[in-house]
Image (spheres, rainbow, N blue to C red):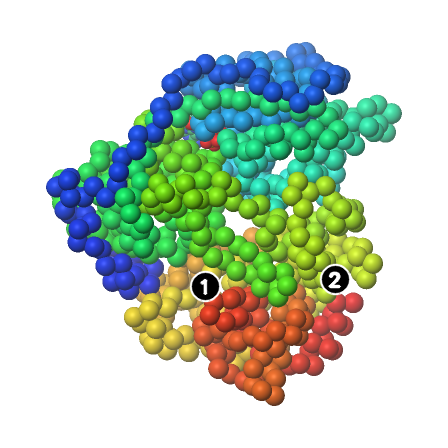
């Protein structure tokens, strides 16, 4: 690594020096001792069952014999002719497509969709389902501009973008023409787009303006096993659109084109899905074998007490001992990724000259899209790429060149305790399905090796699936969306797995407090406006209120600043220095205004890395804040909210505006000198990381409540109790 880049790293990422000490790389696992193979074999080798290239199986199960009208391929359609004549730039790609297992099944697949309203494709990893299915349907003339295009929903934006790029290449057209994508704040589609990859959130938003999804003739719900909250709602909404289209007529009294649904995954419980989708119509299941190259699994021979230490040791051992091939390391979150990045880069500087250089690439949800997509760039000659990723790299994506996967077996799980309104994000073991998806990333183009940093026994004890989000997360945003879609009975909604009543009640109560719902539970005009924002309802409420209070600029900036974990670094061994540095920015109004002060100084310093380093500011996160701010300014402009401000430095106004969204998150100081939340009357404390820690203030507002040793309020601001009774309700009317 050259010195300027190394310096960049040293300054960008803090906590790292400390963590290096914390990690204390055990000598017997030391990377430089690897030469003596007998000593370094921490893993027992368990060869994976090899793919025996057997022929793809035929349709396996049919769940209904009921005959329904069949769709005919429209071979006269213009786009079919154009498609068959399209200019394929790379003939190798055609050959490649033909070798994918799903290619053998393409006529079965097309036929199954002609005969059925809903089909389920259980395509093993690498079978080609995400890239090929839409192309088969276009090539068969079932998807045309006239009949309706195809939507392929993905739980993650990086997958939507990379799949669209790959398919446009295979299809021989420029990205955004026949094949496009749509993710939050980024749309690459055109009037000629036939295959549209989009996130589940974007497809849900489209339902707001097009409840029958009339633009589409086919909808693929990909990676259905992930069971994100949005995918679960989509299941029901797409099913409802299908039914309505079947039974209704358009203005010219003609039947609507049928909407065909395809559910896809490598690992889902197909019978359960078929039953859910089979309520009104027939469903069929197609099983497609995978085209995975063999992946050898190495389990840890004993449980690892420090997964980060184990990840570092294993990654560097692979680098020292294994032939060429990039390494993909799965970690639970951004913090671990940044720590490991620094450690690996440090080791990289002391590698023997005959070894490949290492370069690190990061992949986590909060990273801007341009940076996320950098992981797909090839490693320059003479280097080995090490990708440090969260579970967002787990499904759907192919990172070319990856031959080794290192799996810590951990992920961050968000849970919402509805009784006390507290959200927690804890590091937990992944499910068996996740672990299997992770190993699959090593065998996409050639045989690979997966190093599991957990024992086989630990694997056997893992849950088969992760609990669906809808059963454990805050439901406010999806309930608001359902209400905006005219679904009033959210308790009786057709959920695949119904959430608990407590979760539902909490979401309804929250939306009522925000005045998004009236006292009959009906959506208000304000609620409809809030639903148009692709943001959590509290944030949407703040941005709407900011127009009235003329503080939109500040509101946007605070919302952007809250979009990252933290804008500060606070290394354990330099806590005192870090907190001294923070004092410069401190505002008596508390954390939110302190964050604003940091942003102002950061911009005055033009994001100077030396300045960030000296002031313990996380430069990467600040760049993200600037990016989100830009997107929110565009969003507000689109929504007709002027983004200038005239509140000057009147921070009381800014905090009153924040209170419109975080009204529920307020606490009052008690005569006993502790705080109690206004809504749940719960005893809470100011988090030690807050600038208001240990302060006794009449009333406070927070944006997060977390439970560690005690319930702590984070991102705390000083407010006045009369604001709660006077100001906030007035603004909400
Ligand atoms: N962006 C890409 N670059 C290069 N090759 C790719 C890319 N995307 C897919 N491929 C190739 O196409 C094959 C099939 O990919 P596809 O995503 O369609 O499979 P899948 O069945 O959906 O797999 P999974 O369930 O694991 O996501 C991959 O194994 C890989 O070899």
Element at badge 2? helix
Estimate the x, y position of residue 166 in percent, counting from the top left. 47, 29
Q: Residue at x 39, y 57 (%)?
A: 335
Q: Residue at x 25, y 62 (%)?
A: 21
Q: Is mark 1 within 8 Å of ligand 1?
A: no
Quadrant holding the C terminus: bottom right
As drawn, the label of residue 326 is none
Crowding around mark 1 (Cα neighbors within 10 Å: few <14, some 14 to 19, many 20+) is some
In-front residue for pair 116/306: 306
The quadrant in which residue 187 appears is top right
In the image, residue 463 sits, relative to residue 679, either above or below, namely above
As drawn, the label of residue 566 is 1
As drawn, the label of residue 512 is 2
Farthest bottom residue in view: 671
In the image, residue 398 sits, relative to residue 32, either above or below, namely above
In-front residue for pair 726/640: 726
In the image, residue 498 sits, relative to residue 704, either above or below, namely above
The quadrant in which residue 445 appears is top left
Estimate the x, y position of residue 17 in percent, counting from the top left. 27, 62
């Amino acid at each position: 690594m050259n010195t300027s880049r190394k310096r960049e790293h040293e300054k960008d990422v803090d906590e790292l020096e400390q963590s290096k000490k914390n990690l204390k790389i055990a000598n017997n696992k030391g990377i430089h001792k690897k030469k003596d193979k007998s000593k370094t074999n921490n893993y027992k080798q368990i060869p994976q069952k090899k793919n025996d290239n057997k022929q793809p199986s035929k349709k396996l199960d049919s769940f209904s014999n009921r005959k329904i009208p069949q769709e005919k391929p429209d071979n006269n359609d213009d786009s079919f002719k154009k498609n068959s004549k399209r200019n394929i730039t790379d003939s190798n790609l055609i050959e490649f497509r033909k070798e994918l297992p799903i290619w053998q099944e393409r006529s079965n697949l097309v036929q199954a969709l002609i005969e059925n309203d809903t089909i389920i494709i259980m395509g093993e990893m690498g079978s080609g389902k995400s890239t090929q299915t839409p192309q088969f349907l276009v090539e068969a003339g079932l998807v045309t501009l006239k009949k309706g295009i195809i939507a392929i929903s993905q739980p993650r934006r990086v997958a939507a973008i990379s799949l669209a790029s790959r398919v446009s290449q295979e299809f021989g057209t420029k990205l955004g023409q026949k094949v496009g994508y749509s993710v939050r704040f980024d749309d690459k589609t055109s009037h000629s787009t036939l295959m549209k990859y989009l996130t589940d959130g974007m497809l849900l938003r489209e339902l707001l303006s097009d409840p029958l999804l009339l633009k589409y003739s086919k909808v693929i719900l990909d990676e259905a096993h992930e069971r994100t909250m949005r995918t679960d709602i989509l299941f029901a909404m797409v099913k409802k659109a299908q039914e309505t289209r079947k039974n209704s007529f358009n203005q010219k009294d003609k039947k609507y084109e049928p909407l065909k649904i395809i559910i896809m995954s490598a690992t889902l419980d197909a019978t359960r899905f078929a039953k859910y989708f089979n309520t009104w119509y027939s469903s069929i299941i197609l099983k497609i074998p995978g085209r995975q190259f063999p992946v050898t699994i190495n389990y840890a021979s004993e449980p690892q007490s420090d997964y980060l230490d184990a990840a570092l040791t294993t990654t560097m051992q692979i680098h020292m001992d294994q032939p060429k091939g990039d390494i993909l390391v799965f970690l639970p979150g951004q913090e671990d990724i940044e720590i490991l990045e620094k450690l690996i880069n440090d080791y990289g500087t002391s590698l023997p000259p005959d070894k490949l250089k290492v370069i690190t690439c990061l992949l986590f949800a909060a990273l801007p899209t341009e940076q996320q997509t950098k992981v797909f760039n090839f490693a320059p000659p003479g280097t080995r790429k090490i990708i440090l990723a969260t579970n967002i790299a787990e499904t759907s994506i192919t990172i070319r060149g990856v031959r080794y996967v290192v799996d810590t077996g951990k992920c961050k799980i968000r849970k919402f305790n509805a009784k006390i309104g507290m959200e927690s994000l804890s590091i937990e073991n992944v499910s068996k399905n996740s672990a299997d998806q992770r190993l699959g990333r090593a065998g996409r183009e050639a045989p690979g090796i997966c190093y599991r940093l957990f024992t086989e026994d630990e694997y056997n004890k893992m849950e088969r699936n992760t609990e669906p989000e809808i059963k454990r997360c805050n439901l406010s945003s999806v309930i608001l969306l359902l209400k905006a879609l005219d679904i009033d009975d959210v308790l009786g909604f057709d959920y695949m797995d119904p959430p608990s009543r407590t979760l539902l009640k909490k979401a309804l109560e929250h939306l009522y407090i925000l005045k998004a719902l009236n006292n009959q539970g009906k959506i208000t005009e304000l609620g409809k406006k809030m639903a148009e924002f692709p943001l959590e309802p509290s944030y949407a409420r703040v941005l709407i209120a900011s127009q009235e209070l003329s503080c939109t600029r500040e509101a946007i900036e605070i919302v952007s600043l809250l979009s990252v974990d933290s804008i500060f670094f606070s290394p354990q061994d330099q806590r005192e220095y870090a907190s001294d540095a923070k004092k410069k920015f401190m505002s008596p109004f508390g954390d939110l205004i302190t964050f604003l002060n940091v942003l102002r100084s950061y911009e005055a310093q033009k994001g100077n890395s030396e300045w960030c380093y000296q002031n313990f500011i996380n430069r990467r996160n600040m760049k993200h804040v600037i990016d989100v701010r830009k997107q929110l300014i565009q969003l507000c402009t689109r929504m007709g909210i002027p983004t200038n401000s005239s509140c000057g430095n009147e921070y009381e106004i800014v905090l009153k505006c924040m209170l419109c969204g975080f009204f529920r998150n307020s606490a009052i100081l008690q005569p006993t000198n502790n705080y109690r939340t206004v809504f749940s009357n719960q005893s809470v404390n100011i988090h030690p990381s807050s600038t208001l820690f240990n302060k006794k203030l009449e009333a406070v507002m927070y944006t997060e409540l977390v439970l560690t040793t005690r319930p702590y309020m984070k991102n705390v601001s000083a407010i006045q109790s009369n604001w709660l009774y006077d100001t906030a309700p007035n603004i909400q009317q």
